[in-house]
Amino acid sequence: MFLEVLNDSLKLADIACPPLFPPRHGYLECSRPIDEIADGPSGGSLKITNRPGSQCILKCPTGYRLEGKFSKICGTTGEWIGDENGTCIRYPQPKLLCPTSVNVELHPNETETTTVRLRRPETDVSWERDVQVEPFWVKKDSFSLPLGSLNVSYSAKHPVSKLHTECNFLINVLPGSPPRVDFCPDTQVYTIEGRHQSVKATWEEPVFSDNVGVVTITKSNSPGTDFGAGSHLITYEAHDDAEWKSKCVFKIVVNVNPEQQQQPTAQSHFQLPILYNRFYF
């Protein structure tokens, strides 16, 4: 019995698995026996041998992470057994998207400073832990700034790979001003025909622009509205983010066909004078 065990041990001692090479960017961490081979009376050398039972796993350096599995064991037949579909892939740069610039303006009741509220830049790391801001107080939800420009710098660092990304942008604080009216329609004139009591009116809608951007436009009526005989004021009002506003006002004049006026009815109207005017303020 002892001889059989000894013979098995001797046979295993002659078995070794071939060298195992790691995938690109990675290295192998192995546990295995080390055989000492004498190299003359005055010294010796060490030979690394992959004996049965040796185990190797894939490790990745800083800046890389393991994707998949890579764990191999040297079998009693001299062949490697296990998973080898793992690889080391580079951690991506942290995502950090800043605006090109931010324009804000003084509110109607402000003369020197205004409160700025910034949206956080888009990132895939922790805002509190991994993102640094210069000046540091810009990281607060809101802060006060005077007229002028401020350069802001964000830096995001990946918590594992330590890779980092930076972005910069300007905050411009501008004097307050209402939206500009770039286009306001003239008076529109329509005539009711036949037995109709109204007419559908349409127009090209007003156009506004603003130094910080128009955020809302309200209107009293929309193109395609039905109007009866008479003079109708159409009002558009534009608001910017600082609560400045401006208006465009124009008329829709609806007349009745003169031939219909010769047949008096309860709904008869006289033709209205046409006043080609528009207002914006």
Image (cartoon, grey):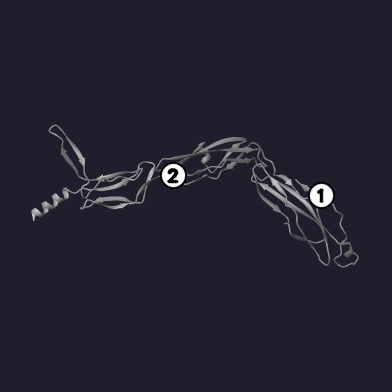
For disc 1, the neighbor class at 10 Å (few under 14, some 14 to 19, many from 20) is few
Asked whether disc 1 touches disc 2, contact meaning CB atoms under 8 Å apart, the reply is no
Q: Residue at x 60, y 35 (%)?
A: 149
**Badge nearest the viewer, 1 or 2:** 2
Q: Residue at x 47, y 40 (%)?
A: 165
Q: How far from the left and from the top, in percent, is residue 54?
A: 23, 48
Earlier residue among tags 1 and 2? 2
What amino acid is found at the position of numbered circle 1 in the picture? Answer: Asn
Residue furthest to the right in view is: 262
Crowding at dot 2, Cα within 10 Å, few <14 / some 14-19 / many 20+, comes out as: few
Image-quadrant location for residue 44: top left
**Circle 1: element type:** loop
Q: Which residue is mark 1?
A: 277
- Between residues 102 and 194, which one lies in front from this camera angle? 194
Q: Is residue 171 left or right of residue 128?
A: right
Q: Position of residue 65 (x, y in %)?
A: 37, 46
- In the image, residue 243 lies at what x, y percent? 66, 46
* Residue 87 % position (x, y): 36, 48
* Residue 57 or residue 225, whichever sits in front: 57
Which element carries disc 2, helix, strand or loop? loop
| Disc 2 target residue | 92
- Amino acid under disc 2: Pro
